[in-house]
Amino acid sequence: MKAATDIVSLYQVLTPAKFLTLEEQEFYVDVYGLQIKRMRTILQLIEDEKHTIYVSGLSGSGKTTALNFLPDTDLHEKFEVKFLMGSDLFDLNDLDIIDVLLILCLNLVEGNKELEKVYLDYLNKVKEQIRGRYEEFTEREKTKSSTIGGGVEAKLGKNPLTHMLTSMGGGLSFLANYRFKRENRKIVREIFRPHVEELLKTTNEIITLYLGKVDKTGDKQLLLIFNELNHIKNLKVIEKLFIDNRIVLERINAKKIITIPITLTFMNGFNAEIEFLGLKINENPLDGQGIELSKEAKDNREILRDIVRKRIDGEVANLVDKEAIDEAIELSGGHIRQFISLLNQAALHNIVNSDGKGKVSYNDLKDGGAPIERQKLSRKLIEEKKIILLGQILEKNIATSQENKTFLECSLSNQVFVYKNSNFWYDVNPLIKGTVKLYAKQIKERGKNDSENA
């Protein structure tokens, strides 16, 4: 990525879905400085080698970029840091604790023949246990099985587990495309479900062996950073992985930072401490202190301006009008991806309508950026129950039904924005406030008329 020198390149560098890597240090803004410093300190001071830090925030709030830049020199001296990108490894809407353990092991052993052999020995051991059980079953059912072709091999050949066991015999390649093969995942989970404890034990053994290979001093611990698990949107998967199997995650013998879906911040079954990453650019309407912006809110607005400044070449620093940036901040609600998306679409509007000349203006933002981003959100406002819920949040800034599936859906789609001071509070995405207000009013009036007619 190169700093923008004109509006065309500005459109290109304002890519909403892109997170920054260490190679793009020059564009990095330390958005969550204090929170990142807090996490670094916890990792250094807490002695529990299995300590887990859960990180949450709205999807698109800059968590992946922040965690990419979290390991500093001091942490690298103490830890062997391993990044695991969820979307590269898993089907995020069909994910199980067994998948996590299997793929974690694969990542640790890959490329090291000695570690690969340890892992394969374990997998083959499980394979033989399963084969033995099926052969024993087949022996007892010989008469019945003979009517469909007979014999142990015929019986095994008709069972889908056997196909997986056969492929396991060929090495670790059966895990290479694991995230693309849902049917294979179902079979593998059936194989390993009774062996979760043993799989966890093997995972921890491989971690010890892995550290012995990569750290010649023998002093380092392993730090696993699980990015993008916050992108899971299937509520059943969220509950099963982070509530039902949280104890398994936390027993992995490494310090861990795990990004989790925003929904877990208000689910009763998840009681862990959460490091919340999100920018507050307005004051909490529940604290009774009025609308005067605090230093924190003002600083956060400046952070958003810095994100744009960093991506523009200094010689053409005025590619975007100040009024356009300020309006994008207001419409973003402090949400980084939405802020970048608004300016990205405003730049596109300028290119289409003005051939990329002049500056990205306030009108480019209002006529190009805001309508497109608003349409994306408004398409999901067709359900009356969503409008009623959002109308209540618009009025009261609280969620009265936090376990309600509708609330979870709205938060996952960024229709509800979640903020945190000492406590969590909520607001409707600024882009759809007007639409929600209008629809909620219509629903209220229709209910009133129905009541009167009854």
Image (cartoon, rainbow, N blue to C red):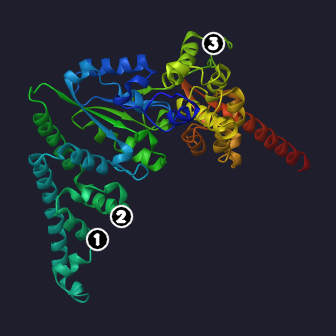
Which residue is at the front of the view, 18 or 283?
18
Residue with the mark numbered 2: 183
Q: Secondary structure at mark 3?
A: loop
Circle 3: is it few (<14), some (14-19), or many (20+) Cα within 10 Å?
some
Three-letter amino acid code of the residue under disc 2:
Glu
Three-letter amino acid code of the residue under disc 1:
Pro
Q: Secondary structure at mark 2?
A: helix
1 and 2 marks in contact (CB < 8 Å): yes
Q: Is 305 positioned to the left or the right of 375 in the image?
A: left
Q: Residue at x 70, y 42 (%)?
A: 387
Q: Is residue 121 above or below residue 156?
A: above
The disc, 1 or 2, on the residue closer to the chain's N-terminal end is 1
Residue with the mark numbered 3: 293
The disc, 3 or 1, on the residue closer to the chain's N-terminal end is 1
Classify residue 446 by image quadrant.
Answer: top right
> How far across and down, in percent of the image, does residue 141 sit?
20, 81
> How far across and down, in percent of the image, does residue 45 sit?
26, 17
Q: Residue at x 70, y 49 (%)?
A: 382
Q: Residue furthest bottom?
A: 147
Residue with the mark numbered 1: 160
